[in-house]
């Protein structure tokens, strides 16, 4: 891939700053993802308790129902014994249902709380970083495209006259405005290079004409 289409500066100092910002944002995001996982694991214990209650209650309900069914075959006392066992089985099933509800609620709560904890810190870091990087990338594409043509180079020189500090313009030429008006190639090239450097692009970078 050509470096023109990479969202990074071709000037060493600015490139180092961009790489450092990438590392810092990645590290910040990773830390908060770990925090979110810790919150998720902590809240998930509620769901795990619900699953254990559901499993245990279902097992007890099954055992009681089976015992009630067997007790029903006991002569004379069968109905008297099986009825309480059946009632106890139904109560255990209700407990199992409550455990299932606790499991479902705990699982959703774990996800929601984890997202709530990590969303704001990550967005605070990522959104400005992404905005600045996209703005840089758009500017880089624009100025490198302009630098590829004589007319675009003249426009870059004009932008430098309008946007760069006077002391930097004076360091290029005693009369940078006059040189631009006379279409002096040396002055125009120097002004265009100044504008390229302000966009984070090393002088001489860009498609050859």
Image (cartoon, helix red, strand yellow):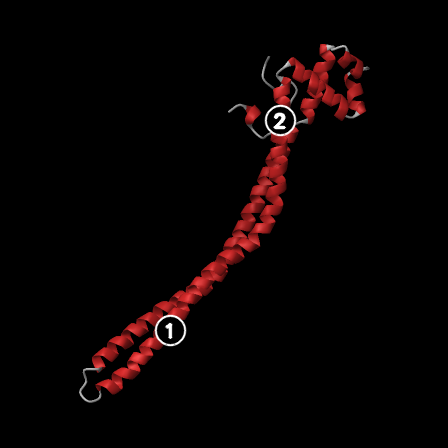
- Looking at the picture, how far across and down is residue 139, in whole percent? 64, 28
Q: Is the C terminus in the top left, top right, bottom left or bottom right quadrant? A: top right
Q: Residue at x 62, y 46 (%)?
A: 124
Badge 2: residue crowd in 10 Å (few <14, some 14–19, many ≥20): many
Residue at mark 2: 140
Disc 2 from disc 1: Cα separation: 66 Å
Residue 133 appears in which quarter of the rendering?
Answer: top right
Residue at mark 1: 94
Q: Nearer the viewer, mark 2 or mark 1?
A: 1
Query: Considering only vertical position in the picture, is 96 above or below 185?
Result: below
State whether residue 101 appears in this view: yes
- Looking at the picture, how far across and down is residue 100, in whole percent? 40, 66
Residue 132 appears in which quarter of the rendering?
Answer: top right
Q: Is residue 188 left or right of residue 52?
A: right
User: Is there CB contact under 8 Å for labels 2 and 1?
Assistant: no
Secondary element at tag 2:
helix
- Looking at the picture, how far across and down is residue 7, in whole percent? 58, 30
- Looking at the picture, how far across and down is residue 103, in whole percent? 42, 64
Secondary element at tag 1:
helix
Badge 1: residue crowd in 10 Å (few <14, some 14–19, many ≥20): some
């Amino acid at each position: 891939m050509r470096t023109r289409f990479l969202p990074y500066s071709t000037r060493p100092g600015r490139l180092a700053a961009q790489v450092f910002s990438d590392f810092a944002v990645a590290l910040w995001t990773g830390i908060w993802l770990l925090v979110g996982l810790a919150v998720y694991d902590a809240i998930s214990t509620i769901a795990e308790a619900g699953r254990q209650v559901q499993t245990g209650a279902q097992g007890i309900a099954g055992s009681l129902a089976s015992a009630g069914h067997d007790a029903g075959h006991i002569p004379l006392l069968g109905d008297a014994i099986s009825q309480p066992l059946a009632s106890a089985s139904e109560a255990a099933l209700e407990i199992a249902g409550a455990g299932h509800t606790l499991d479902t609620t705990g699982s959703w709560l774990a996800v929601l709380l984890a997202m709530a904890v990590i969303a704001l810190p990550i967005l605070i870091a990522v959104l400005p970083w992404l905005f600045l990087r996209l703005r840089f990338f758009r500017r880089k594409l624009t100025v490198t495209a302009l630098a590829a043509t004589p007319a675009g180079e003249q426009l870059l020189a004009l932008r430098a006259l309008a946007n760069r500090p006077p002391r930097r313009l004076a360091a290029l030429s005693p009369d940078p405005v006059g040189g631009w008006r006379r279409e002096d190639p040396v002055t125009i090239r120097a002004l265009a290079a100044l504008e390229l450097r302000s966009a984070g692009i090393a002088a001489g970078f860009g498609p050859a004409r």
